[in-house]
Image (spheres, rainbow, N blue to C red):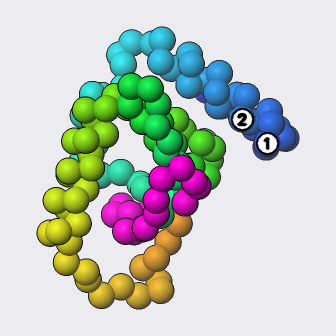
């Protein structure tokens, strides 16, 4: 099956991607519950977080998919905070070169940021 999307505008592609994602979510088999062993990752993506009545909104910006939003319950926010703190305490910087820093990599760059704004 082949589709020619070369003539679609950004808005048309956004609509196509959104509709395809809704359709994919309804199909079996569902995407795997566990993450793959290897994945292409966006290095230091823009992100946003804000509180919700029962948790937190976490948004990550993918260059092709746009803003992907997740509403996490409070206990997941606490778990992530403790995991990220633990990983930060174990973090040992490695030497990197400018050539190693690419827009997509298997291991994302370590970034900084706060809450309530886009980072």
Quadrant in which residue 54 is drawn: top left
Q: Secondary structure at mark 1?
A: helix
Query: Which residue is identified by label 2?
Result: 14
Magenta span of residues: 104-119
Quadrant in which residue 8 is drawn: top right
Quadrant in which residue 32 is drawn: top left
Give the spatial CA distance, label 2 vs label 1: 6 Å
Q: In the picture, which quadrant includes the N terminus?
A: top right
Residue 33 on the magenta segment: no
Query: Which residue is identified by label 1?
Result: 10
Q: Residue 105 appears at what percent x and percent y?
A: 42, 64
Q: Residue 52 appears at what percent x and percent y?
A: 47, 31
Residue in the picture at 56% in, 19% down:
22
Chief secondary structure of the magenta portion: loop
Q: Is residue 76 left or right of residue 12?
A: left
Q: Residue 83 appears at what percent x and percent y?
A: 20, 51
Work out whether residue 111 can be spotted: yes
Q: Are marks 2 and 1 in contact (CB under 8 Å)?
A: yes
Q: Is residue 87 left or right of residue 13?
A: left
Q: In the picture, which quadrant includes the C terminus?
A: bottom right
Does 22 appear above or below 63?
above
Residue 108 on the magenta segment: yes
Q: Is residue 15 left or right of residue 28?
A: right
């Amino acid at each position: 099956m082949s589709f020619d999307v070369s003539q679609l505008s950004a808005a048309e592609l956004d609509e196509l991607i959104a509709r395809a994602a809704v359709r994919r979510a309804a199909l079996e088999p569902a995407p795997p519950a566990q993450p793959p062993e290897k994945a292409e990752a966006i290095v230091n993506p823009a992100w946003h977080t804000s509180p919700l009545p029962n948790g937190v909104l976490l948004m990550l910006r993918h260059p092709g998919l746009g803003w992907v939003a997740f509403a996490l319950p409070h206990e997941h926010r606490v778990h992530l905070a403790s995991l990220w703190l633990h990983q930060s305490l174990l973090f040992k910087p490695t030497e990197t070169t400018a050539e190693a820093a690419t827009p997509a990599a298997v291991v994302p760059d370590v970034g900084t940021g706060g809450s309530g704004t886009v980072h």
